Amino acid sequence: MNRLGSVLKHICMLLFSVLISIAICLVAFFILSYTNWSETSGKMNSATNVLSELESNGNGYSLSENGQKMLSEMNEFAFVLDENGKVIWAYDKPEDVKDKFTASEIAVFSKWFLGNYPVTVRVCGENDGDLLVVGSRRTDLGKYNLTYSVKGLYELRYIIPGLAGCVFVIIFLLSGLSERRERRERDRARACWIDGISHDIRTPLALVMGYAEEWQDDSSLSGEQAKQAHQMVIACNRVKSLISDLNLTMRLDYKMQPLKKDKFVLSAMLRETIAELVNSGEATDVEPDIPQECNRILVRADRRLMQRAVTNLIINAARYKSSGPVRVRMSEKNNRCFVYVENKMDRISEEELTNLNRNTKTRFSGDGTAMHGTGLQLVRQIAKAHGGKLVFTGDDTDGCHLIAALSFRK
Amino acid sequence: MNTHRKILIVDDEEKLRTMLSDHLVNAGYTICEAGSCASAKEMMQRVRPDAVILDVMLPDGDGFSLFSDLRLICPDAPVLFLSARDEDSAKLTGLGLGADDYITKPFLLKELELRIAAVIRRVYGDDMQKTVSHFGTTTVNWGSAEVQRNDGSQTTLTLKEFSLLKKLYENKGNIVTIDALCSALWDGDLFGYENTLMVHVRKLREKIEEDPSHPQYILTARGLGYKMSKEVQ
């Protein structure tokens, strides 16, 4: 569901990027068009206004007072060319502007500049035979002429996908950053919450565990009551392990637990782990099968984490075994170490094996309840942190055995 | 064995203090309690305990700061942190300050008792010399390392046998791995010492057990190590 949601979200982002890109292109296009239009329209209006104030009286032209005032205020000049290109009327024409122009000169300045003066040209006179030229002395006035090709507009279809891609990448990165920040905040809140809960549980649990331990050794209690107290101690130990697993999983998940790698003898660590489990009563029937030659195998790993991983595998095996002891073996091959924890089962289906090997945080049964908690997930995380993995296999050669193989780099 | 020592328990949880106190009194220690930094300091001045069990989070301060103050009052008293915080950083802070041990809640009372005993032994030395232990009809005198048998015969333990027996006795009822035993005897890894260890165990059994081929007190934990029976007095 989450994956589908993520795909839909990205499709929406892509569509949104395309729409944004189209909008950017169109806005840019119209801005350019408008700029061009408005730039010229100002001049056009000025020339048009002057034209309306210009009077033709048969012999020549005259400009009304209003027209003159307009030109003065705009710091502009004007002149009229006849059909031969000769200046037949002028108002405030600069000295460096010629009195006669060739057809090619007229063609050039009608679109651009007359010398350094931006000019606008209008047709005037009887039968529209003359040309009114209004020029500006302002050097900060730009004048350009854009010719838009309709074909060019179609070219946008090649720009839009590229632009959409860029916009998509930008949106994607921004949204990624924002998501990362949100996730970090959420993780921190979760970490604090788990840490707080763990802390609050530990003290009352210490009380329950302590008194249960006292009762299990109390000779005044009946055998049954002592057995119940022993069960309470075991249950408390499980809760204790669960709290530690939760905290450790969280720290490994959020990279809050740096590895403290040291060299140690793996077989010694395995024996110590088994002895601790047997001494505390968390697992009673555990048989190490470690040949003497293994006692020289040194590994470089985080001892505490490795011990935790093996503890979790043994507890898991002891909890789900059908009969017989839990066997612990080890071997080394190609610079890798393997720890095998084996227990007997009534049966193991392929589906169960697949589920055990599925690398998910928690596996759920059909009714949605968690089948395996953080224990095995923590083993996987520890193995991964040491460049290794956890693999479950079944062995039917002598009854049905489930073998958990924890491998890691030496 | 060192159990006449005075221990100060500093924890804001009164019920936990009571539980710890009851258990340690039964183990032979004298206990005094404090629920805050202020009362802990006052108690340190007045009682001068031999060891302190110190919680990290207290109502009027933290155990780490209190630790430094306590060190000024009783520089020699070993301190064992008892905390609900199990992060490595907290442990390292505690041990880095010079604390003698760090135990995370919840804990087994027996483990706590053993660790306190170990810390006190390390600081004040071993007063095992004053006691004897009974392995059935056989008696071991820890001071002279002599073994007195029921038939009147008397033998002396070698240094390695004595160290081996002591290590097992300190962890009575629990499996001690061959690695831990080698470490106690030779201060090194197991490799190369396995067979020598077996020889020492065999000889020790011959001196302690009535029937060494069917030992009752020094038991083998197959593939792991050895365990001293709880029956030993």
Image (cartoon, coloured by chain):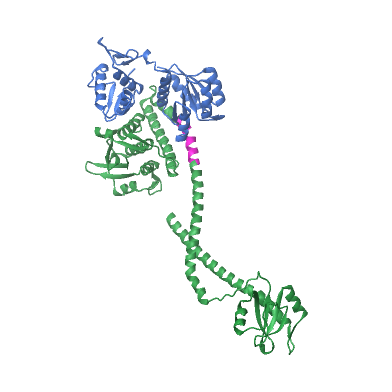
Asked which quadrant contains residue B1, the reply is top left
Placement of the N terminus of chain A among the 4 image quadrants: bottom left
Please give the range of residues in magenta. A192-206
- Of residues A316 and A15, the one drawn nearer to the viewer in this rendering: A15
Question: In terms of depth relative to the viewer, which is nearer, A308 or A204?
Answer: A308
Measured as percent of width and height from the top left, residue A268 is found at 31, 32
A201 falls in the magenta region: yes
Residue at the location (50% across, 71% down)? A156
Picture layout, residue A250 above or below residue B182: below
Residue A295 picture location, percent across and down:
27, 33
Does B180 sit above or below residue A193?
above
Vertical position of residue A363 compared to residue A144: above or below: above
Q: Give the blue chain's letter.
A: B
Q: Which shade is chain A?
A: green
Q: Tell me if residue A241 can be seen.
A: yes
Q: Is residue B37 left or right of residue A43?
A: left
Outermost top residue:
B152
Would you say residue A1 is visible in this rendering?
A: no
Q: What secondary structure do most residues of the magenta stretch adopt?
A: helix
> Is residue B92 part of the magenta span, yes or no?
no
Percent position of residue A293, x then y? 24, 34
Position of the C terminus of chain A by quadrant: top left
Relative image position of residue B177 (x, y in whole percent): 31, 28
Nearest to the observer: residue A232 or residue B187? B187
The image shows a total of numbered marks equal to 0
Q: Residue at x 50, y 38 (%)?
A: A196
Seen from this angle, which residue lies furthest right?
A: A65
